[in-house]
Amino acid sequence: MDPAADDLQEARAGGVATITFNRPARRNAITAAMFERLLPLLEALAADDAVGAVVLTGAGSAFSAGGDVGEMADRDPAETPADATRTLRRRMDAARLLHEMPKPTIAMMRGPAAGAGLCLALACDLRFAGASARFTTAFARMGYAGDYGGSWFLPRLVGPAKARELYFTADALDAGEALRIGLVNRVLADDDLPAHVGALAQALAAGPRVALREIKRNLNLADEASLVETLDAEAAAQIRCRLSADHREAARAFLEKRKPVFGRG
C-alpha cells in the first residue's frame, strides 16, 4: 500500500463521512496526490445514499495550510500551461462537489486554514472553528491569484469589499474576527469542537434527507436566480417533499406527539 494514501483519510459513523487531511507535521498541506484522491472520494460520497452528511477536517492542530509549497517549487518544466490549467480545473471540482452535493457538508477547523485549504472550507455549507483557528487567503503572498472557488465563495459570505481586502492583503483573521464577519458559523473551544460538530453531523444525517437535499438546492439556486425562478423551484421542491416518506413520518409523529424517525426518503 502506498504510504502516501494515508495522507487523506475517510471514516464513517452513523451516516456521517469524515474526510481528514492527515499530514499534521506539515500543517496538513495538500499534495497533488491528495487533491487527485479528494475528487473521486467526494464524487462517491455525493452518490452514496448511506451518507447523510460530510465533515471535512484536518489532523492535529491545523485544518490545512493549503497547497504543498514544496511541490509548487518543483513543478514539471515540461508541462504546458494548457495542460496544467486542465489538471487544476479538474481537481477544483472538489469545491463544486462540497457546495453542490445533495447533503450537508461541514468544515471543522482548528489552527491555520489557508489558501486552497480555506477555499475548500468556504465551499462547505457550514463552518465551525476552534478558538485556535486562523484564516488567510494566502495566495497573494505566493504570487498566486487563487483557486478552488474562493473568489466565488468568499464575497458571498463576507461581502465583496471585505473579500477583496482579504485577497489583496492576505491578512490573517483570528477565530473571533472570522465569526464577526460571517466567515464561520460558530467558534468553540478546541476541545469541544469535535463533539459539537459530531453531534450536529449525526443529527443532520438522521434528518429528513429529501427535505435537506431540497433546502440545499433552493439556497444554492437563490445565489444566482431571480425571485420568480426561486419561487418556482421552491414550489416544485415543496411538492417533492410532500410526497416523501419523511414528510409522512413527520406528520404522523407530530400528531402522535413523538419524535420522528426518518428514513432515506
Image: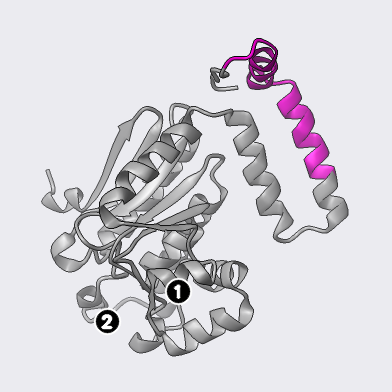
Question: Along the line of sight, which residue is nearer the eye, 159 or 176?
Answer: 176
- Nearer to us of marks 2 and 1 is 1
Q: Is residue 15 above or below residue 59?
A: above
**What residue type is disc 2 on?**
Pro
Q: Does residue 251 show up magenta in the picture?
A: yes
Q: Residue furthest right?
A: 228
Q: Which mark is residue 4?
A: none
Q: State which tag comes first along the sequence, 2 or 1.
A: 2
Could you tell me how many numbered marks the image carries?
2
Q: For mark 2, what is the residue? A: 77
Callout 2: helix, strand or loop?
loop
Q: Is residue 260 above or below residue 171?
A: above
Q: Is residue 38 above or below residue 115?
A: above
Question: Is residue 181 among the parts visible in the rendering?
Answer: yes
* Residue 258 falls in image quadrant: top right
Q: How is the image coloured?
A: one colour
| Left/right of residue 261 with respect to residue 110 in the rendered view | right
Question: Is residue 37 among the parts visible in the rendering?
Answer: no
Q: Residue at x 66, y 53 (%)?
A: 220
| Start-end of magenta stretch | 232-258
Q: Main secondary structure of the magenta part?
A: helix
Residue neighbourhood size for the residue with mark 1, other residues' Cα within 10 Å, grouped as few (<14), some (14–19), many (≥20): some
Q: Residue at x 54, y 53 (%)?
A: 99
Q: Residue at x 42, y 79 (%)?
A: 81
* Residue 67 falls in image quadrant: bottom left
Q: Which mark is residue 177?
A: 1
**What residue type is disc 1 on?**
Glu
